[in-house]
């Protein structure tokens, strides 16, 4: 027996199936859907109908029942067709939706994949990543535009770092770029150590060389010097032809600024020996460099305008460093009293010289460096002592005093009596000042068109700063190749006669 509680749901299901199947033709259907206790013997071959009863009311009372019969097969067929159409439309909509979703996802994922790949390249330090142009205005398009802007900013930052890196050490560049106020205009008063270097007689030398050779020499020389300055954490302020202005102690100050400046100067003079070896191999004249170092207070900061500026220093300490350097001869490093006082226990001095600066009443003592002890222990290359040879026939020479960049029109007549490779003993007819610069014009029938020579008065033959009609020692600061060859012939001739 079937449970009474199950019969009614089964009857409802069977009535629903009437619209789709021939279930109403079976006895099972009549058993569940027909009146209870009735057993009909239906002819299943007859057509089946769907009956619809509609009550008719009059004055609120049912007076009749309208019975409509519809062929069940037609109804079932119509419902089945519509059901299949609905299922087909639903499946088509689902397929089209999935296709559209796949297309939209592909359009979205492609630029995201490109951005992910580009981000990985940038993380590895490669900023030469090319992003495709983005024409979309959705979130992905805005993300791509923002990423491209960020990439441009990183490229500009790297360009600034590379540009600064030509003049500043890596630590200083990071300090400037890492500080929010690092690149703002303005300055501060600070005690720093100034280093000034200059090639002796390079202007005169350049006049006898081709422009290509001049630029080639300068680029190789300055490139090597800048590498050394950066290695000692110096800041290159500017180049002035063959001259270099650098300082130690800004923008990052350290307790060993003076020590590093002197060690750097010694390393620069040592490197010049190697540069001169290359100069000789190339058939080019040798270079001679003088370096002056001074310590004092200056104003340091970004100098210029919003469109163009540089990190530099301003102050009288710089002018004094230039004056100190002007007293050097080739291969020499001179220190101011302030630098010597700061590292007196570390620096090795060959000699001192008292000079008179313009505007100062008292003379200034300069210290000639030969080496350094301590953390940056180093020494200048050893130089063979020069031997003056007495000439068989003295050479006539006209000496023109040089004051700064101005050459006097009045010459002091004299004769070269003794000669070495880079110095000469000269007998002058008028007084000269110790450590003054001279332009020499040799006068010889053997070589009537010799180039000009520049020299410095490095010694007098008697007490005091001046001498009259006496011998002085001149150190050559610039010796052109033709004059060098001529003087070598004179020394060889004198040596043969001794």
Image (cartoon, rainbow, N blue to C red):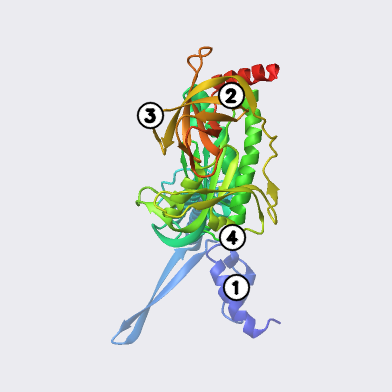
The mark tally for this picture is 4
Residue at point 61% right, 53% down?
A: 260
Split into 4 quadrants, where in the image is the C terminus?
top right
Residue 401 is at least partly visible in this image? yes
- Which x, y percent locates residue 374? 70, 56
Determine the secondary structure under disc 3.
Answer: loop
> Callout 3: few (<14), some (14-19), or many (20+) C-alpha neighbours within 10 Å?
few
Figure check: 489 above or below 32: above
Residue at numbered disc 2: 284
Q: Secondary structure at mark 1?
A: helix
How far is mark 1 from mark 4, CA to CA? Answer: 121 Å
Looking at the image, do the residues carrying marks 3 and 4 touch, with CB atoms under 8 Å apart? no
The residue labelled by disc 3 is: 410
Q: Is residue 406 above or below residue 43?
A: above
Q: Closer to the N terminus: mark 1 or mark 2?
A: 1
Instruction: Name the one closer to the observer, 112 or 355.
Output: 355
Closest to the observer, 191 or 457? 457
C-alpha gap between disc 3 and disc 1: 145 Å
Between 203 and 178, the one lying in front of the other is 203
Judging by the rendered image, the residue that carries numbered circle 4 is 342
In percent of width and height, residue 214 lies at 51, 27
Quarter where residue 495 is shown: top right
Q: Earlier in the sequence, mark 1 or mark 4?
A: 1
Mark 1–mark 2 distance (CA, rounded to whole Å): 124 Å
Q: Which mark is residue 208?
A: none
Q: Quadrant of the N terminus?
A: bottom right
What residue is disc 1 on?
Answer: 30
Residue that lies at the very extreme toward the left in this rendered image: 59
Q: Earlier in the sequence, mark 2 or mark 3?
A: 2
């Amino acid at each position: 027996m079937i449970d009474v509680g199950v019969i009614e749901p089964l009857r409802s299901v069977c009535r629903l199936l009437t619209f789709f199947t021939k279930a109403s033709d079976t006895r099972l259907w009549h058993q569940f859907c027909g009146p209870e206790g009735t057993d009909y013997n239906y002819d299943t071959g007859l057509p089946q109908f769907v009956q619809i009863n509609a009550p008719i009311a009059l004055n609120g009372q049912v007076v009749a029942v309208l019975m409509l019969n519809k062929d069940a097969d037609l109804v079932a067929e119509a419902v089945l067709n519509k059901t299949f159409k609905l299922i087909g439309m639903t499946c088509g909509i689902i397929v089209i939706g999935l296709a559209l979703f796949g297309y939209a996802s592909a359009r979205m994922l492609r630029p995201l994949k490109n951005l992910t790949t580009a981000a990985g390249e940038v993380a590895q330090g490669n900023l030469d990543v090319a992003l495709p142009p983005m024409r979309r205005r959705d979130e992905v398009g805005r993300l791509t535009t923002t990423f491209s802007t960020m990439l441009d900013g990183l490229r500009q930052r790297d360009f600034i770092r590379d540009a600064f890196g030509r003049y500043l050490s890596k630590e200083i560049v990071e300090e400037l770029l890492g500080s929010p106020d690092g690149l703002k205009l303005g300055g501060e008063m600070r005690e720093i150590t100034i280093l000034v270097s200059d090639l002796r007689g390079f202007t005169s030398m350049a006049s006898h060389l081709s422009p290509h050779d001049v630029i080639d020499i300068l680029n190789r020389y300055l490139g090597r010097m800048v590498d050394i300055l950066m290695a000692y954490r110096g800041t290159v302020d500017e180049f002035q032809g063959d001259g270099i202005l650098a300082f130690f102690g800004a923008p990052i100050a350290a307790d060993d600024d003076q020590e590093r400046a002197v060690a750097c100067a010694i390393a620069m003079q040592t490197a010049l020996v190697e540069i001169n070896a290359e100069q000789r191999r190339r058939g080019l004249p040798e270079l001679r460099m003088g370096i002056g170092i001074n310590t004092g207070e200056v104003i340091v900061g970004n100098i210029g305008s919003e469109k163009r500026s540089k990190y530099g220093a301003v102050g009288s300490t710089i002018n004094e460093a230039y004056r100190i350097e002007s007293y050097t001869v080739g291969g020499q490093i001179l220190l101011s009293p302030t630098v010597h006082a700061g590292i007196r226990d570390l620096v090795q001095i060959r000699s001192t010289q008292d000079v008179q600066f313009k505007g100062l009443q008292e003379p200034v003592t300069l210290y000639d460096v030969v080496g350094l002890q301590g953390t940056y222990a180093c020494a200048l290359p050893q130089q063979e002592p020069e031997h003056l040879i007495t000439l068989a026939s003295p050479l006539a020479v006209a000496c023109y005093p040089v004051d700064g960049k101005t050459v006097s029109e009045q010459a002091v007549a004299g004769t070269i009596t003794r000669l070495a490779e880079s110095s000469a003993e000269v007998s002058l007819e008028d007084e000269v000042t110790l450590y003054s610069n001279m332009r020499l014009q040799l006068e010889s029938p053997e070589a009537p068109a010799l180039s000009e020579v520049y020299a410095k008065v490095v010694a007098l033959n008697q007490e005091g700063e001046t001498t009259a009609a006496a011998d002085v020692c001149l150190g050559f600061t610039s010796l052109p190749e033709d004059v060098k060859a001529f003087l070598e012939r004179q020394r060889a001739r004198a040596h043969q006669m001794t």
